[in-house]
Image (tube, helix red, strand yellow):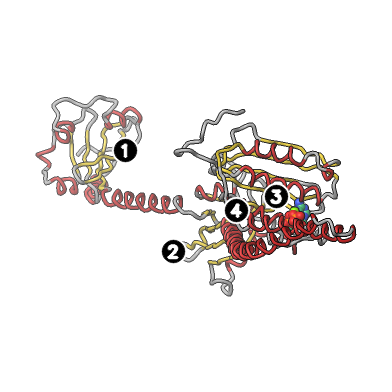
């Protein structure tokens, strides 16, 4: 027998045994695409015999074609040309196959034959699909979470940051941005401390921890308070393979709590004002009648000729004080909203200008500068002009009083289309309102001014009128440099649209 590559018959036989023992079907093809043999697994798998394949063309046998494939598509041609292994994956009915084409070289180093092996990778493919699906699912869970999620490898290099985390921490761009390492997420030393606690079995159990409040640092250097839970991810052998942390911004929680407190305070205030309003209305009506009597009889007495000068002077005092009482009663009726209201569609800035002309010439305003930053936009509200005049005058007089008659009062009006609100701010450079007085300033009869001169009804009347307009008033800011009151009016819309009132 002709010896191949100087191999003995034994050796040749031994090599054929190896070929036959291969667990995957393999067929030998000559460069002219003719099948020259196959291993045992091939014959078994395809239920063929040597006779049935020997001398057949591969394209005929495997692809049922009469002509060969194009050389750029034919793996056999590629192997002969490149002298190296070529592989491709195909789906054959329900099976996934990896077809591996390996060269068999002759003594001169040319490709004498090509072995084509078929590896069944259906199971591996199914696992790969499952794995891909599971990975996709986990990715979706991570990215649709309302909490910020960050994962890092054992060295602390960040490899996952969901969109909430990117927003919370700022510039992270898949390792391209500024944030790359977990140490950058915390103040100096904090990351190490968290890792130490995480590994401590006594705190939260080994490998996990919940920290109700801690500080993180954004890529802009801003420090933010968050609630954080962290965990070490272990591999199947129990070795640390990664870490992950979930953060919730406490600012949002804090804001909701703050808003709730403000709303509770406002509710308590309006309840108090409502009951005080009823009381005031009752008292005002009761006092009004006897007061009219006092005024009437005092005026009658004053007209008599038989009274001396001293008596006349006393009667004038009585009339003056009784008139003052009448003014207070009038104010109380306004505060308690028992007086009617006459609302029209008006421009806020116009009413403001009107109010200023009413007080401009008063002695109190001689050394006071009034600065106006009034919006050019249409500021349409539904309001009772004379009552709003009263509101603005009260606020401006209070501001002047707080500055002891000298300084600047700044009036600013603007609107917020999204909130559908119109704002007016009255700012002074006065002494401010003390913390203990802040909760009482809108109460009727609360005053820190000279007894006898001020009734302390101004702001309570303001409050009542503002409520009547479905508006809100509050102290925006107060301190030793002055006080700013802010009023928030609802924007007026006719039939759901902003009216197109022409500017005068
Ligand atoms: N702009 C302000 N700066 C500092 N304190 C103020 C200011 N506005 C009001 N206050 C405080 O609120 C209190 C109540 O104000 P309010 O207008 O109700 O009464 P009043 O001004 O004291 O008296 P009235 O307005 O009846 O003459 C004032 O006495 C003052 O202590
Ligand atoms: Mg006042």
Determine whether the residue tagged by mark 1 lies in a helix, strand or loop: strand
Q: Residues within 10 Å of mark 3 (few under 14, many from 20)?
A: some
Q: Which of 417 and 11 is in front in this view?
A: 417
Numbered disc total: 4
Mark 3: is the Cβ under 8 angstroms from ligand 1? Answer: yes
- Foreground pick, 182 / 104: 182
In space, the residues marked 1 and 2 are separated at their CA atoms by 33 Å
Q: Name the residue under label 4.
A: 339
The earlier-in-sequence mark between 3 and 2 is: 2
Point out the image quarter for the N terminus. top left
Helix, strand or loop under label 4:
loop
Q: Residues within 10 Å of mark 2 (few under 14, many from 20)?
A: few
Q: Quadrant of residue 342?
A: top right
Give residue 96's position: percent from left, percent from top. Answer: 25, 45
Which residue is situated farthest in the front direction here? 306
Please say if 254 is above or below 342.
below
CA gap between label 3 and label 4 equals 25 Å
Residue 32: image location, x then y, percent = 21, 27
Q: Mark 3 points at which residue?
A: 485
Q: Mark 1 = which residue? A: 87
């Amino acid at each position: 027998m002709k010896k191949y590559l100087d191999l003995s018959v034994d050796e040749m036989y031994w090599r054929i045994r190896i070929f036959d023992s291969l667990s995957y079907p393999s067929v030998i093809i000559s460069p002219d695409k003719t099948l020259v043999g196959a291993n045992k697994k091939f014959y078994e798998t395809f239920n063929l015999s040597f006779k049935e394949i020997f001398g057949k063309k591969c394209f005929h046998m495997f692809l049922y074609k009469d002509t060969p494939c194009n050389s750029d598509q034919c793996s056999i041609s590629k192997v002969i040309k490149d002298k190296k292994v070529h592989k491709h994956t195909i789906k054959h009915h329900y099976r996934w196959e990896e077809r591996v084409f390996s060269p068999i070289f002759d003594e001169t180093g040319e490709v004498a034959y090509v072995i084509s092996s078929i590896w069944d990778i259906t199971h591996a493919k199914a696992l790969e699909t499952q794995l891909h699906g599971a990975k996709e699912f986990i990715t979706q869970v991570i990215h649709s979470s309302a909490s910020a999620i960050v994962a890092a490898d054992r060295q602390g290099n960040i490899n996952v940051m969901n969109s909430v985390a990117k927003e919370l921490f700022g510039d992270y761009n898949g390792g391209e941005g500024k944030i790359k390492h977990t140490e950058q997420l915390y103040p100096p030393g904090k990351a190490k401390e968290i890792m130490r606690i995480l590994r401590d079995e006594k705190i939260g159990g080994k490998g996990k921890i919940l920290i109700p409040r801690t500080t993180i640092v954004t890529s802009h250097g801003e420090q933010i308070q968050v609630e954080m839970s962290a965990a070490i991810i272990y591999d199947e052998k129990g070795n640390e393979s990664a870490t992950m942390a979930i953060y919730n911004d406490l600012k949002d929680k804090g804001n909701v709590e703050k808003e709730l407190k403000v709303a509770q305070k406002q509710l308590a205030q309006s309840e108090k004002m409502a009951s005080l309003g009823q009381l005031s209305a009752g008292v005002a009506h009761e006092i009004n009648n006897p007061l009219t009597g006092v005024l009437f009889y005092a005026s009658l007495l004053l007209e008599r000729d038989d009274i001396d000068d001293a008596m006349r002077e006393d009667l004038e005092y009585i009339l003056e004080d009784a008139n003052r009482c009448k003014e207070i009663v009038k104010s109380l009726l306004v505060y308690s909203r028992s007086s009617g209201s006459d609302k029209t569609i008006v421009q806020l800035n116009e009413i403001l200008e009107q109010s200023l002309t009413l007080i401009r010439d008063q002695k109190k305003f001689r050394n006071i500068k009034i600065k106006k930053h009034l919006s050019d936009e249409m500021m349409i509200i539904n309001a009772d002009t004379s009552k709003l005049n009263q509101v603005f005058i009260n606020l401006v007089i209070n501001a002047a009083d707080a500055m002891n008659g000298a300084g600047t009062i700044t009036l600013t009006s603007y609107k917020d289309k999204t909130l559908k609100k119109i704002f007016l701010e009255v700012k002074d450079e006065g002494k401010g309102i003390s913390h203990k007085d802040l909760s009482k300033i809108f109460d009727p009869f609360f005053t820190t001014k000279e007894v006898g001169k001020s009734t302390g009804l101004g702001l309570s009347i303001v409050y009542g009128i503002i409520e009547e307009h479905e508006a809100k008033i509050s102290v925006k800011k107060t301190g030793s440099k002055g006080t700013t009151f802010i009023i928030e009016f609802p924007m007026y819309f006719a039939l759901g649209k902003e009216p197109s009132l022409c500017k005068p």
